[in-house]
Image: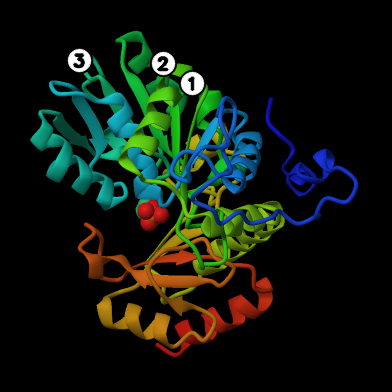
């Protein structure tokens, strides 16, 4: 059953005792007071932290599944992969998803005897999944915003004995619920919309598979890839407003996508919420919201740079999901996209002001 996002604000409040602080206390301690028997007690800062526990309580509520938090999205992805692959495993990853996941697989997992294969998101299911031990998916893909049928992939991979992992960063659990579609493990960069204020890096792993979560917990404890208590505290605070921020961001993205699609300076707009978008039918079938990310393609690199830098309401920054709208040309990092391709992350600004600034910058090209 999907949790009600409004409950995020009250999760902590529901369990308070008289005199407790209303805001979550931040516990900065590597040591715990342990005179004698240690059963059931917090032992050491790499293993336990009360601020993580509260954060993970909230994340678990959002995911409707056990969750473990990590110091970045990549730390969460590493944990999910190290918990599921071994020498000789065959791993399938998207060729057009978040590029650091590919680097991790190609540069490190392959050296340990993991056989890594890549497929494009739009033709991901072609060739089937027989023989793959772990299938890693990203839908919508970042930055192309292509989608795959998560329920179909989950079913086919399970039928051949494999494990599925979905990177759900771009839509968040409020926009898409891969575990409910049969995916085994969800990973997320909470650096993006979950934190939402561009002031922290964090990530999490969610799964209803007890064995996998035990491995993920052991990986965190042994590898030392633990979140800092302050980041955990900041993420917890950000999550209290995720529902309102996300609602505004998705609603504004729809408005902007529709208007951008009719502007003469824009060659192409991709947004899953546009009826003509190649991902629209899948988005309607498997997502709750169409998200806050869109892309627009202008004629060339110079025009794209002039548009971004000429718009005072767009931060020219990499990363996305913050309260401030941001945009960048993805070709500058080597993504396989048109030189005039811009990923735009819609923030929480009033949409009419945002549109006026975007339109003025496009008109000035
Ligand atoms: C940003 C991102 C990551 C990595 O997250 P970090 O917090 O930067 O480590 C992974 N997947 C996707 C889709 C992302 O956008």
Front-lying residue, 239 or 152 = 239
Front-lying residue, 234 or 362 = 234
In which quarter of the view is residue 316 placed? bottom left
Q: CA distance from mark 1 to mark 2?
A: 7 Å
Which label is found at residue 56?
A: none
| For residue 168, above or below residue 271 | above
Q: Position of residue 299 (x, y in %)?
A: 30, 74
Which label is found at residue 155?
A: 2
In the picture, measured across the screen, residue 281 lies left or right of residue 10, that is left
Where disc 1 sits, the SS reads loop
Q: Seen from this angle, which residue lies furthest right?
A: 18
CB contact under 8 Å: marks 1 and 2:
yes
| For residue 180, above or below residue 247 | above
Crowding near the residue tagged with mark 1, few <14, some 14–19, many ≥20 C-alpha atoms within 10 Å = some
Residue behind mark 1? 182
Where disc 3 sits, the SS reads loop
Residue behind mark 3? 131
Q: Position of residue 248 (x, y in %)?
A: 68, 60
């Amino acid at each position: 059953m999907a949790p009600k996002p409004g409950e995020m604000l009250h999760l902590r409040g529901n369990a308070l005792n008289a005199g407790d602080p209303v805001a979550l206390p931040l516990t900065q301690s590597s040591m715990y007071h342990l005179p004698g028997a240690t059963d059931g007690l917090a032992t050491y800062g790499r293993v336990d932290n009360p601020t993580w526990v509260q954060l993970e309580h909230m994340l678990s509520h959002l995911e409707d599944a056990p969750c473990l938090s990590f110091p970045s999205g990549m730390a969460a992805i590493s944990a999910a992969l190290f918990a599921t692959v071994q020498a000789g495993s065959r791993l399938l990853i998207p060729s057009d998803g978040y590029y650091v996941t590919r680097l991790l697989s190609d540069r490190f997992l392959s050296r340990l005897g993991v056989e890594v294969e890549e497929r494009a998101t739009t033709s991901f299911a072609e060739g089937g999944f027989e023989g793959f031990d772990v299938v890693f998916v990203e839908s919508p893909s970042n930055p192309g915003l292509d989608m795959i049928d998560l329920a179909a992939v989950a079913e086919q991979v399970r039928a051949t004995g494999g494990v599925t992992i979905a990177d759900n960063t771009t839509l968040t659990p409020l926009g898409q619920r891969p575990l409910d579609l049969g995916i085994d493990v969800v990973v997320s960069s909470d650096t993006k919309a979950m934190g939402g204020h561009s002031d922290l890096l964090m990530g999490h792993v969610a799964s209803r598979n007890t064995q996998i979560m035990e491995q993920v917990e052991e990986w965190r404890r042994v590898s030392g890839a633990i979140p800092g208590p302050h980041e955990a505290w900041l993420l917890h605070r950000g999550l209290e407003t995720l529902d309102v921020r996300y609602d505004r961001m998705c609603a504004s993205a729809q408005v902007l996508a529709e208007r951008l699609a009719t502007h003469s300076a824009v060659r192409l707009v991709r947004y899953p919420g546009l009826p003509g978008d190649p991902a629209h039918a899948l988005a309607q079938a498997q997502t709750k919201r169409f998200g806050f990310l869109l892309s627009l393609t202008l004629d060339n690199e110079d025009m794209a740079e002039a548009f971004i830098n000429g718009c005072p309401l767009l931060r020219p920054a990499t990363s996305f999901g913050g309260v401030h709208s941001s945009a960048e040309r993805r070709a500058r990092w080597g993504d396989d996209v048109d030189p005039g391709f811009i990923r735009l992350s819609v923030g929480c600004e009033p949409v009419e002001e945002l549109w006026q600034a975007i339109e003025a910058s496009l008109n000035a090209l």
